[in-house]
């Protein structure tokens, strides 16, 4: 089994509040890992650091390897490129651009990667079809249901075929039926494309479906 994330001695403080306390974590390729725990435990902070959206505090023993690459030493530009190529994000609130259609929203990360319009749209259509949104290409987010908006956000997260997907309360804003179908989708993607998922969630069903459930309490992983 190959390792996709190797994190060691991850610390994070805001002023005198230590939010993460020497977190060590290894995640394997094609693993679905859930992170649960009380509000304020540091889950989102950890996810943001593992996803390279935020940086751990500097410490001589701190290490963050993603696909074998030491992301801690990359400058902002290289990091943005690395993120766009290898990592997808799904948030509680879909964060789609309201003035763009579903297909335009999905294409954005591909355009950032300099994929041609023809190829980006081809891939976006493939993903939207796969996610049951074949007849929604040209709808704006406001013309879609919550579950559909979240599936567009999933398609956007997937368009560059990332090895790693981070999700922060992905179903927190969905009715139970849409939530359940989104959860099954994560496992289907993992099974079909060997993608790795790290998911912060309060949803017990999703947390328990994961291959591994990590519990964070007071800045530390308990198990
Ligand atoms: P969780 O996701 O487990 O609810 P978070 O990682 O969001 O926890 O937050 C952990 C703690 O860090 C909380 O006490 C929160 O208020 C604090 N915190 C998070 N981000 C910041 C920030 N940018 N500035 C100051 N404090 C922060």
Image: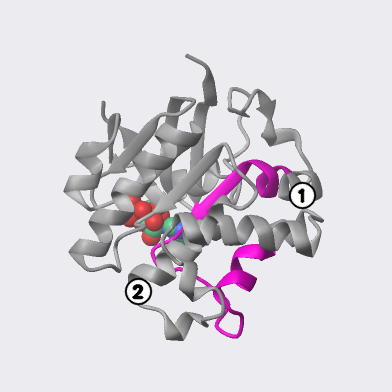
Tell me: residue 155, above or below residue 42.
below
Q: CA distance from mark 2 to mark 1?
A: 33 Å
Q: Nearer the viewer, residue 7 or 15?
A: 7
Q: Which residue shows up at 56% across the image and 49% down it?
A: 88
| SS type, badge 1 | helix
Q: Secondary structure at mark 2?
A: helix
Taking the spot 77% from the left edge, 62% from the top edge, the residue there is 118
Asked if residue 40 can be seen in this view, the reply is: no
Was residue 102 drawn as part of the magenta stretch in this picture?
A: yes
Q: Which residue is mark 1?
A: 76
Q: Residue at x 28, y 35 (%)?
A: 210
Percent coordinates x, y for residue 83 in the rendering: 66, 46
Q: Is 33 part of what is drawn in magenta?
A: no
What's drawn in magenta, residue-wise? 82-108
Q: Which residue is mark 2?
A: 146
Q: Quadrant of the C terminus?
A: top left
User: Front-most of 168 and 10?
Assistant: 168
Task: Give the quarter the ligand 1 occupies.
Answer: bottom left
- Percent x, y of residue 79: 73, 45
Is 77 placed left or right of 9 in the picture?
right
Mark 2: few/some/many CA within 10 Å (<14, 14-19, 20+): some
């Amino acid at each position: 089994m190959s390792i996709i994330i190797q994190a060691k001695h991850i610390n994070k403080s805001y002023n005198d509040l230590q939010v993460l306390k020497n977190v060590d974590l290894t995640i394997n390729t094609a693993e679905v890992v859930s992170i649960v725990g009380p509000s304020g435990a540091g889950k989102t902070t950890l996810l943001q650091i593992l996803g390279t959206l935020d940086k751990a505090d500097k410490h001589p023993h701190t290490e963050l390897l993603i696909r074998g690459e030491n992301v801690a030493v990359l400058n902002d530009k290289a990091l943005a490129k690395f993120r766009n190529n290898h990592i997808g994000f799904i948030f509680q609130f879909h964060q789609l651009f309201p003035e763009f259609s579903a297909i335009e929203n999905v294409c954005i990360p591909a355009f950032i990667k300099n994929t041609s319009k023809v190829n980006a749209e081809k891939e976006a259509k493939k993903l939207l079809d796969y996610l049951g949104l074949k007849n929604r290409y040209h709808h704006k987010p406001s013309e879609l249901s919550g579950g559909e908006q979240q599936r567009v956000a999933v398609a956007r997260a997937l368009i560059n075929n990332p090895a790693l997907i981070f999700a922060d309360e992905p179903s927190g804003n969905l009715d139970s039926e849409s939530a359940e179908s989104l959860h099954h989708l994560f496992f289907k993607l993992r099974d079909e494309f060997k993608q790795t998922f790290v998911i912060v969630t309060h949803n017990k069903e999703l947390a328990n479906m994961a291959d591994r459930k990590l519990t964070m309490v007071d800045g530390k992983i308990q198990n």
